Every structure is written in structure tokens, then in C-alpha cells.
Image (cartoon, rainbow, N blue to C red):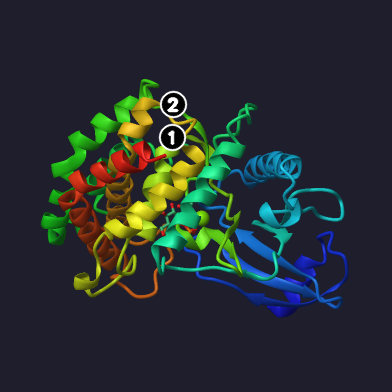
Amino acid sequence: MEKDLKEIASHFDTDAPVISVNPLGEGFINDTFVAATDKGSRYILQRKNSAIFKDVPAMMDNIKRVTDHLKRKISEAGGDPMREAMTIIPTRDGALYYKNGDDYWAMSLFIENTRSYTAATDPSLAYQGGKGIGLFQRLLSDFTEPLADILPGFHDMRFRLIQWDEAVKADKAGRVASLVEEIGWIEARRDRMMEFWKMVESGVIPRRVTHNDTKISNILFDTDGEVLCVIDLDTVLSATALNDFGDSIRSYANTGEEDDKNLDRVSMSLEMFRGYTAGYLSQAGDFLCEAERDNLAFSALFITYEQVLRFLMDYIDGDTYYRIKYPDHNLVRTHAQYKLLRSMEEQYEAMRRTVGEELSGR
Ligand code: GN1
Ligand code: MG
């Protein structure tokens, strides 16, 4: 395996020969490795999941155009484009990916001397994360060339509910009969979720270039705690900015793990919510329209609901999408995310108030 991985890495335009390749991180979708050269330089090597990303070339083209734009803007503002944005490393033939059999591989520069987290440890970290995503969206607010829609229907509630209805009907893994209560959680909220989604469909809530997978592990922080760089750009798409905000809250403000078996640990921390909101608005406050501001708090409920739906749907389908570590992992994830959703619902008025305070305090 190591030998094959080195062979794969050798196709990319690294500054020196790669001498080792080791696994990194815990992604649910792609396989990620660190490749090191005999000069000491390091690179991220990824096998993209082509069952999920059906058009890896178009995805890599999106990422390249977005990172080029970010780098231009970062340089103009006097920042360091090699540390504050991802750098895609092409193959020696100048392609953005290397195809080996059915597998697509891509490489980027490893950004040294950074910190990453799987959970927010204090509100100032949440503030920095919010600032990072707000800045990411702001720097891309003048990116006007269309991006390829490489994941049709990704955060589209109408599409997700169609998929959901089909999954429940097909009952591929024979699990539906045991999931009456969980299925009820989805059904009870579908109208409210569609009410929100219709505002996106009608354009009342605009589409922008957004990240679409803003959990805390997808941001690198500097060693002094400042936000540095947004990574994992596979899902960069034209979508609502609220998806990014909501998905961040789902991640930063959860007092437990995404797949916590101990539901007593899971709740939404209003303090983390405030921290993230303040950081996000420090960058995004000026470009968000009225309807976006008004729905910031709701977007956290929306994306958490979507995540309950996606984990449960994958469990119903027989675990074909998300990588699982044990047989009922997707059901455990479903329960943990539902507990988080309930906690958000209980605190919804306080969340709205907090957004209002942070907006007026700017
Ligand atoms: C997946 O692969 P990873 O961990 O970055 C998923 C996200 C989910 C997330 C749940 C393309 O992200 O949408 O929110 O898991 N990515 C895709 O943690 O489906
Ligand atoms: Mg991802």
C-alpha cells in the first residue's frame, strides 16, 4: 500500500521526491494522507470518493478557480496567500487530479504550524471560526463566474425530502419498522423546513458562493489562536450563506460529540452560539440581506434537521454513504443530532435574541 501511495504521489508536482505517505484525519467521505518529501516539505494527498463526487474533474476545477480568487484577494489585502488559502498541487502534466484505475487523487500543500480542532473549546475559538467563514464568504462575494453544480441537491430540502420518501418506501435494509419514532421526528418538521427552503427557491434568500461543510475540523487556526485558513473545499457551491452559518453552529455549539452515545452530554451552548455569531457578523454583517439576518438562528435548526435526516436515511438505506465504525453508528449519529436539534428548538427564542443583540452591537 505504502509503495502504491508513493507511486501515486510521484505523479504530482512536488518540490522533491516523496519518501513517505501516512494516513491523516477521520473524514467520512474521502481518504486523506500526508506525503512527505526527502527535503522535509509536506503535502496532503487525497483519494476523492468518486461514488459521491460523480465529476471529480469539475470539482477540482471549482476548487482551483475559488482558491485562485481567494489568493488574489488575500495578496491584495497584504496577507499570505500560501498560508491563508489552500494551494492545489497539479500533476507533472499540469492536471488537477491523477486518475488511477477508477480512483481520482488530488494533492494540496500541507500548511505547517497550525492547529485544528474537532470541538470548540471556548467562545473565542468559536469567534475565530465564525470570522474565518464570514471572511471566506466575503472574499468570494465578487466571484461571479458560475461554479459547476457538482453535488446536485446537496443542501436542497426539496430534493432531500424526495430522497427521504423514496428511502422510507424502498426500506432497503428492512429497518423501517423499527424506526417509527425516529421517522416521526422528520415528518413532524418537514413543513416548517420547506417553508424556509421556499425562501431560497424564490430568491428571497439569495445564493452565494459558500463552503457547505463548515464543521470546525475544516478550519485551520494559527498557533496563536487566530483563524488561518478554510480547508476541504470539495463542496464549494452556489448555495445560501445560511447553510454555512447553520452547519457551523451544529458543530461549534454542540457540547457533546456528533455521534455521542451519551445524550446527556449533547446540547447547544448559547455561549458558543454567541461567539460564533459575533465572529461571523464581524465579516459578513455588511453583505447579508434582511432575510438572511432574520433567518440566521433558524439556519442552525435547518441544517441540524437535515443532518438528522441524512444520517437516518443512510441507516435506512443500509449504510451506503457515510463511513461507519460500528453497525448502528448512523443510528447513534441520528439520536445525537436529534438531541442537539431539540436543544436548539428549546433555545430558539434566545438564539434569535442573541443574533439581534450582536447585529445591533456592531
Ligand atoms: C461529511 O467528509 P466530511 O466529514 O468532511 C459530509 C457533510 C456532513 C458531514 C457530517 C460531501 O463531511 O455534508 O455534514 O460529513 N460531506 C459530504 O459530519 O456529504
Ligand atoms: Mg467534507
- Identify the residue at horizontal 69%, vertical 45% (top origin): 67
Determine whether, in the image, residue 136 is placed left or right of residue 260: right
Foreground of the two, 133 or 188: 133
Query: Can residue 21 be seen here?
Result: yes
Question: Residue under circle 1?
Answer: 240
Quarter of image, res 24: bottom right
Query: Please, what is the three-letter code of the amino acid marked with disc 2?
Result: Pro
Give the residue at the far front of this rendering. 361
Question: Residue under circle 2?
Answer: 206
Quarter holding the C terminus is top left
- Identify the residue at horizontal 84%, vertical 48% (top origin): 94
Query: Please, what is the three-letter code of the amino acid marked with disc 1?
Result: Thr
Q: In the image, is residue 133 above or below residue 158?
A: below
- Closer to the N terminus: mark 1 or mark 2? 2
Callout 1: CB less than 8 Å from ligand 1: no
- Identify the residue at horizontal 75%, vertical 46% (top origin): 78
